[in-house]
Image (spheres, coloured by chain):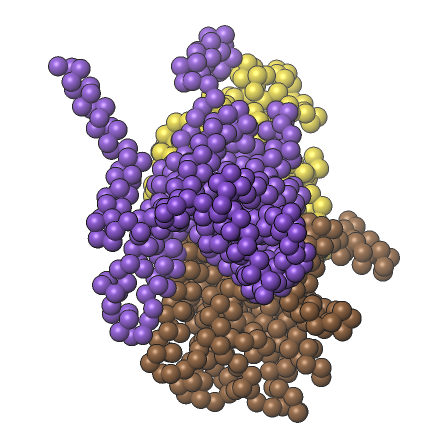
Amino acid sequence: MSDDKQIVSRLKGFLLRREVIITAVIVALLTFLLITRGVPMILTIFIDFAIFAIVTLSLNLEVGYTGISQFGRVLAVMAGAFGAGAIPGRVMAAIMGLPWGASYAEATVNFKLVPQLTAVLEKSWFLSIVFLIFCLLVAALCGAGIGWLTSRPAIRLKEAYLGISLLAFGDLLMWIGHNWEPLVGATTSVYIPDPFRFVPGNRFQVVVITVFVIAFLIYFFINKLTHSPFGRTLKMVRDNEISAAAAGKDVVKIRTRSLMIGSAIAAIGGALYVIYTGAATAIGFTRLTWTFWPWAFMMLGGIGSNLGVLLGVFLLTILRSMITIFRFQVFGFLIQWGIDPTWLEFTLMGAVIIVVVLFLPHGLVPEKVEPVLPADRVQKVITNMSSRGRFLT
Amino acid sequence: MAPWLANGLIYASALALTAGGITLLYITTRTFNFAHASMATVGFYVVYSFIIFIGGSPYRYFPFAFLFGALLGVICYYGLNRPLLKRQASEITLMMSTLGYDLILLSLIQMYCDFLTSNYKLFPRRVNMNMYDLELFGINAATIILPLMAIICLSALHLFLGKTKFGVAMKATIENPVLAGASGINSDRVYMVAWLIGGGMASLGGAAMAMAQTGTPVMGMNSIPFMFAGAILGGLHSLYGGILGGFMVGLAEYAGVFLLSQKFGPWILGYRMGIPLLLMAITLLIFPRGLAGIPWADLFGRLTGKKRGVQA
Amino acid sequence: MLTVRNLNSGYGKLQILYNLDLEVPAKGITVVVGPNGAGKTTLLSSIMGTANVFSGEVLFEDEPITGQQTHLLARKGISYVPQMGNVFAELSVMDNLHMAGYLMSKSEARLKAEQMTEMFPVLKKFIHRKAGTLSGGERRMLAVAMGLMKNPKLMLLDELSTDLAPIIAEKVLLEVIRLRDELGITILIVEQMAKRALEIGDTAYLLVSGGVKYAGKASELLHEPELCNLYLGIKQLPKQQDNTRIPSSEGRG
C-alpha cells in the first residue's frame, strides 16, 4: 500500500520535472510535424538540431562552465569550416596529381575538380570514411588553434572587453575569407568532396544519421568532461578566479584548455555543416547565425546545463522551422502587406532572449548545484566543529 | 577635399556619436548596448522615410531621428533594462537582453523594408543618401554639416553634464550611485535620461553614417563592431574617451585604406575593417583599459614639469 | 526614531545579519561597535536600501522604510556618510557640496555650502579642486560636511574617524555632540575608535557575527571588561581618565 503510494509520488515527481515536460513537448511537436509534413521535414530539423547542438554545447562549455564571455563563437566554427573546405580536398588533389595550390579554390577550377575527387570517394567506402575523419581532425585542429589564439587576449582582458574583441575578430575572419580567394574561394564557394556518396540510396538520410550520432557522442563527451574533476575545476574558476588560484589552480592554463577544447568542438560543428551542404562560403558565417543563435539556444536551455542546452536547441529549432512551414497559414496577413514572414524568425529569437532574461533567468533546465561533498558529510563536519566550539553563536 | 577625407570625416563623426552613446550607457547602467546597431539603422530609415514621403534636405529630419532613437532607448530602459538593473543582473545578462531587443528591432526594420518595397515600389534595401544631399562651397554639404553637427551635439552634452544641476547629478551617479542616492538623486531618472540621450545619439549617428555609406537594413549591424571598437578604444570609462575613440576608429579606417591602397593596390579595400580592429587590438595590448588607461596626466605633468596631487 | 526589527540581510545570497533588533532613540547618539566583519556597515547599507533585506523591517518615525530606494530616504531626512566612497572624486569640492544639497533650492544650497566651508576652512581653500585630489582627512571632512548639508533629522555615520588625525577626529566627534545638543539631530555612529565613540554615545550596541551581543547605555558597555577586552580591544583601566589614544585591534568593519 505505502509502496504503491511511494511509486506513484515518485512517478509524479519524475513526470513533473522540467526536462521531462520539455522532452514531451518536443516529441509532440515532432510527431505533429511528422504527420502533417512527412519525413524530409523531420530530417531537416534533425540536422539543424545536431549541428547547432554541437556548437551550442561547445559554447556552454566555455560560457557556462568556465565563465568566458565568448562572443566570437563564429570564429571557431569558421575555422573548422574553412579548414575542412581548404585542406582535405587539397591533400587529396595533391595525392592524385591534380592542381592543389592557390588555384584549387578558384571557382572555375574548383567546380570541375571536386566532382573528380568525389568520384574517387564514391568508389571506396574506406576512403570516404578516412576522408570524413580527416576533415573532422583538420577542423578540430584548426579550432583548437583558434581557441589557443583567443585564449591569449582572454587572459588579459576583462569580461566585456573580451566579448567585444572576439565579436570583432569573428567579423574580421569572415571578411578575410570573403576576400582572400585561395582560402575558400572568396566571394564564390569552395566545394567539398562528398564522403557520403558511397552508400547507395538516400544520401541525406545517411548524413543526418552520421551528424546526429556525432552530436550525441560529443554530448556524452562534454557531459563526462564537465562531471570530471576538470569540470569542477572549470566551475571553480568561473565562480571565483582568485580563490581558484589560491587553491593552486593555474587559471590561465585551465581557461586556455577550456577554450581549446570548446573551439575544437565548435570547429567540428562547422566542418560537419560544410560537408553536409557540400560547399564552404565565407559570407555565410555571420555572427548572427553562429554566435547569437547559439547564445539564444543556450540561454533558453539553461547556461551551465548540458541537457538543458540540448533541449533548448531542439525546441527552438523546431519553432524556427515551424515559422517557415506555417508562414502562409498563420502569417497570411503579413504577406498581404508584402512582408516576408521569415523575418519573424528574428522576432522569435529576440523575444525568446528577452523572455528568458526577464522571466527565466536560469533557463528551462537550470544548472544543478552540486556540492563537492555530500550534504550529510557537510553536516557532520559542521557538528564536529561546533562541538569543538569553533563556531560562536 | 579628397573624397576619402570627406567620407572619412562623416563616418568618423557618426562613429563618435554612436561610440559616445555606447560609452554613456555603459558607464551609467553597466550595459553594453547591442541594440545600438538597429537603433542606428532606425535613425537612417526615419530620415529616409521623411525624404521619400515629404521631401527636402535630409538634415531637416535629423532631429526626428534623434527623437525616434530616444524613444527606442526609453522603451528599452523601462521594458528591459530597469527590471534587470533592479535584480542586479550580471553584465553579460544585461548585454544579452539588448541583443534580444536588437533582433526584434532588426526584424521590424526588415519588415518595414519589405513593406516599402512592395507597396511603394521603392528600393529601401540599398539607399545612397548622397543623392539627396545639397552642395555647399562646391562640396557635399554632409562633409561640413555632419562633423559640425557632431561637434555641436557633443558640446551640448558637455555643457549639460558640466553646468546643469541634473547633468552634474548624472556625473555624480555615474561615479558613485550609492552616495548619489543618499544625496537624494533619483538614479532611476538618471538612467532613463542616459538611455534617452544614448538612444538619440545612436539614431543620429546612424542617420549620419548613411551619408557616407550605402544605407541598408543591416548597416548598423555591420558597423556595430566599430562602434564598440571606438568605445573600447576610449576606455569605456570616460564619455569623452569614447567619443574620441569612435572618431579615431572612423578616421583611421578611411585614412588607412587610402594610404595602404596607394601603396599596395586596391585589393586592400576588402580588408578595410581590419584596420580599426587592429588599432583597437594594439591599443588594448599596450593599455588594457584603452585610451583612458593611458596616464595622460602623468605624461602631461612630466612635460610641463608640474606635479599633480600635491597636498597643501 | 529609527527601529530595526528582526532584520535578516546581506549581499546577494550571502547573509550577514541575523535577527537583528535595534532602536535609535530620537535626539541621541547611538553607537554601534563591534569587531571586524560583524556586519556594522551592512547594517547601515540595509537601512539605506543598498543591501538585500531578506526579512524583517526598518521603521523611520514609525513608518516602514524597508527596501525603499535610497533617494526617497534622503528625501525623508536621513543622511548617510559612508565609510568608503563618500565623496564624488570626479567633481569639485563645490559641486560635491551642491550635490549633497540636491534636494534644496539653489539659494538655500549656496547658503548652506557657505556655512560648511566656514565650519571646515580647509574646504574653502580647495573649493574648486576635484575631491579626488584631497588627502584622506580632507576628504573625510568634506564627507561630513556633505552629510550635514542636508539638514538631516537622522545622520548615519560610518567609521567617522578613519583617515583623520587624532586631533581632528576629536574635533569631529565634538562636532557630533554639538549637532545633537544644538540642532537636535539623531545620530547613529558606527565606529572604529570604539572608546571615544562610547564616551560620547548615549546608547550603545555591540555587534558580533551579525547579531547584537550587547544593548544598553554606552557608558555601561565600557564597564563590561570581558566584552571590551574580547571584542573591542579596550583594556580596562578602572577609574582612570586616560587621554592617550588607544590603538584598537580592529580594522574597518
Q: Residue at 38% x, 83% y: name it.
A: B121
The N terminus of chain B, quarter of image: bottom right
C153 horizontally vs A32: left or right: right
Q: Can residue C74 be seen in this view?
A: no
C129 horizontally vs A243: left or right: right
Q: Chain A is drawn in which colour?
A: purple
Check the image and name the residue furthest to the top: A388
A209 to A245, vertically: above or below: below
Q: Colour of chain C?
A: yellow
Task: Tell me how many marks there are.
Answer: 0
B81 to A267, vertically: above or below: below
- Rendered location of residue A33, percent (x, y): 25, 50
Q: Residue at 54% x, 17% y: name it.
A: C227
A243 to C153, vertically: above or below: above
- Rendered location of residue A195, percent (x, y): 49, 46
Q: Can residue A332 be seen in this view?
A: yes
Q: Residue at 36% x, 30% y: name it.
A: C6
- Rendered location of residue B3, percent (x, y): 68, 81
Check the image and name the residue furthest to the front: A123
Quadrant housing residue B134 = bottom right
The one nearer the camera, A12 or B82, is A12
Q: Chain B is drawn in which colour?
A: brown
The one nearer the camera, A363 or A243, is A363
The one nearer the camera, C244 or B55, is B55
